[in-house]
Each structure stands twice: as structure tokens, then as C-alpha cells.
Amino acid sequence: MHKPIRAVLIGFALCCYLFTIFINIISSNLGVELDWFQASIGNTTARFQFDFTPAGWVFTLWAVIFFWNLIWHFYALTTICRRYKHEYVYVFPNALPTPFWVAWIINLGLNIGWQFLFDGRHMIPAAVFMALIVISLIVCLATTYFRTCRDGAWMKDNMPGDLYAVRLLCHNGLGIYITFATVLFFLNLGICLIWWGAGANQIDVTTGLFSGLAFLMLVWFVLENFTPLEPYCRYTLTIWPTLIVALTAIFIHRRAPVGGDIPADFWNSNDRNDIYNAVLLGVACLFCLLRFIIVLVLHRRKPIDYGSAEYPEDLEEFQMVNTKRFERQRFSRVA
């Protein structure tokens, strides 16, 4: 049986997503010509450069983000038309529940709002919007992680293709997005502190931003590998590569700003932020390597325990049994 509200949300989310892509495309020079924007986002960023500003080429990550997440949007659209045994796929198994779509649509609205706020140089509200973008993405990931694990037993035995699709397309697409959005939040925060705050020193602000990023890196590495959260996010592997790209762009831009050639003294051992940036980049590479090794080992030796493969024929009975089983065995793994 269809659930009209969820089906409408899926379709509406795709429309919102396409409109968000359109706004991001015209936020370049085209938007200026159409008189939608005062300047391109790139030019606005260039006017507020400091040591945390990444090289311009890193913003091509938006193309990767939009393309990757567009794929799982089309996948989600197919679940409205497909059914397996008891129900339509978008109804059950429910890896992308209604709260996910609500949070995602809010995220898209925030993304569009941030574009106009940043263009209008309303940097403090823009920073708030970017923080809310990150929070909404956390909600999206949390809801789909939980529901994917809860209904994982059914999906693994009956619809493994859908299980892999959600993990590869949705979880990893959101992983790229939330990582890049977090870096942009720190960038936006730095602009606020330097130009809209008490005129803080650029070097000190950059050091503080690197420290905040280092803290998040350490916390996330521990959470995704050594806590009960591990089974939920085991196959989300795009976070560290995205961070490596962002840190590389920051390091390169610091040594060769806008249109400049790379100087002979590419490395300045007396610049604490040079050292900090290089250390964080090295740590990110190490964490990325360790993450891939840990996932590979756990995949082979400790598969995620989704519980019993015995399912009642009645859908409502199965959902009730599956939910209770999941609550009892939450986060468990095969020994």
C-alpha cells in the first residue's frame, strides 16, 4: 500500500534538489548577468581571503557532490515504482524514512539561502546557515544509518542490491557533502571573526580553525571505528578523501594565493600554520589509510550482525519482530 505523504516528499525533494543545483550553477558569472547575484561566489570568497581559504579548484567538489547525490535521488524515485513481496520498496524496507526527507528538504532550502546571504555579504547569518546545513546533514545520516541497520536483515537476504545502493550512493554522497560543508563552515566562521568581529588576527584565527578541525577529525575517527556507532557508518568511506582534498587545497593556496606561481620557499618552517596544515594533512592521510584497513578487516572477519534470517510472512508481524530484535541486539556484531 502506498504512503502518499512519503511519495510526495520524495518527488518534491528531487524538484528542490534540481532547483538547488540550478541556483548553484548560476551563482557564478551567469547569476551576475541575470542580476540574481551581486558577484560570483568565487569572487566574493576572493575578497575575504585569509590563511584558511582553499584554492579555487576545490570548489569543483560541488559538482561531485551534486552529481553523486543526484544518483541516489533517482534511485529513491525508483523505489516508488518497485515492490517486493509485501510492500513497495519506499514503504518497506525503509532505509530512507520520512524524517530523512524532511531534513533533506530543509537542508536544500538552507543551501539556497546560504548562497544569497554569502553573496550579500551577510556573513554572520551565512555562517549560521552553514552550521544548520551541517546539522541537517547529521540528521539525514543518523536517520538513514538507523533505519538501514534496523531493516538490514531483510535487505541483506532479499534486496542486497538496494542495501548496497543506499550505502554506496546515499551514505557516501552525504559523506562528501557534510565534510565539505564543515570545511566551508570553518571558512565562513573565520571570515566573520576577522572582518565582522573584533578584527581578530588572521594568523590566530587560522590556528583556531585548524584546532577545531583537528578536534573534529579525532572525534570522528574514534566514533566511526571504536564505538557502537561503527556498524552504522562502516561503509561510509568518502569523508577522509574529501577532507584530504580540502586540506591540500588550503595548503596550496596558502603558499600560492590567487593566480600566483608556487614560490621557491614553498615550505616555511617558521610559519606555525604551515606546520599545522601539513600535520593535519598527514594525519588525515593516515586516518584515511587506517579507516580503509579497518573496514576491510571488519568486513571479512566481523560482518554486521543484522539478526535472524527467519521472517514471518505477514508484513506487520515481521516489522514488529524485526524492530524488537533490533532493539535487543543494537550495535551487535558477529564475534
Image (cartoon, rainbow, N blue to C red):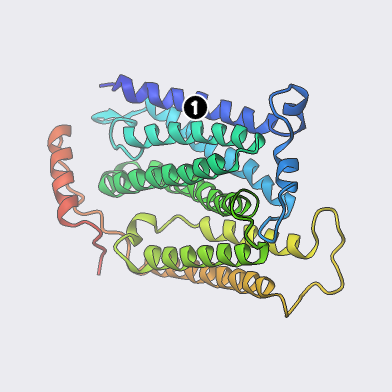
Using a 10 Å C-alpha cutoff, classify the residue at mark 1 as few (fewer than 14 neighbours), some (14 to 19) or many (20 or more). Answer: some
Number of callouts in the render? 1
> Left of 322 or right of it: where is 7?
right
* Location of mark 1 (residue): 14
Residue at coordinates 58% horizontally, 59% vertically from top-left?
A: 243
Query: Mark 1 belongs to which amino acid?
Result: Leu
- 320 left or right of 12 in image: left
In the rendered image, residue 91, in percent from the top left (x then y), is placed at: 29, 30
Please tell me whether mark 1 sits on a helix, a strand or a loop: helix
Q: Quadrant of residue 95?
A: top left
Q: Can residue 314 be seen here?
A: no
Residue 262: image x %, image y %? 84, 65
Furthest residue toward bottom: 269
Q: Position of residue 224 (x, y in %)?
A: 39, 63
Residue at 23% across, 61% down: 332
Q: Nearer the viewer, residue 295 or 15?
A: 15
* Residue beneath the point at 30% across and 44% down: 147
Camera-nearest residue between 209 and 148:
209
Q: In the rendered image of this protein, does residue 188 appear above or below residue 271?
A: above
Q: Position of residue 57 (x, y in %)?
A: 73, 50
Q: Quadrant of the C terminus?
A: bottom left
